[in-house]
């Protein structure tokens, strides 16, 4: 897969990923949430942060 270098495409990508995160977060039932669910949310946030860092480093070059 070709790296996303266009700023507009980067923002669109991040918005889509954030929307997915929010949908997962909204679907979680606090009464039945397990550690694995929390770990999944943390991993999603870590992945999003990593992608933001990648985009930022491409802009700096």
Image (cartoon, helix red, strand yellow):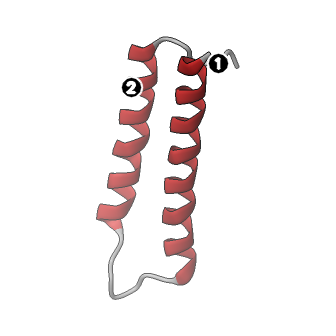
Q: Is residue 16 above or below residue 34?
A: above
Q: Residue at x 40, y 52 (%)?
A: 21
Q: Give left or right: position of 43 versus 23.
A: right
Q: Secondary structure at mark 1?
A: loop
Q: Residue at x 64, y 18 (%)?
A: 3
Neighbourhood count class around disc 2 (C-alpha, 10 Å): few under 14, some 14–19, many 20 upward? some
* Corner quadrant of residue 25: bottom left
Q: Position of residue 9 (x, y in %)?
A: 44, 17
Mark 2 or mark 1, earlier in chain: 1
> How many numbered marks are there?
2
Question: Quadrant of the image for the C terminus?
Answer: top right
CB-based contact (under 8 Å), mark 2 and mark 1: no
Q: Position of residue 46 (x, y in %)?
A: 56, 54
Mark 2, residue position = 11
Tell me, for residue 3, which label it has, or none: 1
Of 28 and 55, the residue lying toward us: 55
> In the displayed image of the protein, which residue is found farthest to the bottom?
31
Q: Position of residue 28 (x, y in %)?
A: 36, 71
Of 29 and 5, the residue lying toward us: 5
Q: Residue at x 70, y 19 (%)?
A: 1
Q: Secondary structure at mark 2?
A: helix
């Amino acid at each position: 897969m070709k790296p996303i270098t266009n700023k507009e495409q980067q923002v669109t990508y991040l918005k889509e990923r954030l929307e997915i995160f929010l949908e997962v977060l909204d679907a979680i039932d606090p009464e039945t949430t397990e550690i694995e669910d929390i770990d999944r949310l943390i991993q999603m946030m870590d992945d999003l942060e990593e992608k933001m860092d990648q985009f930022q480093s491409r802009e700096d070059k």
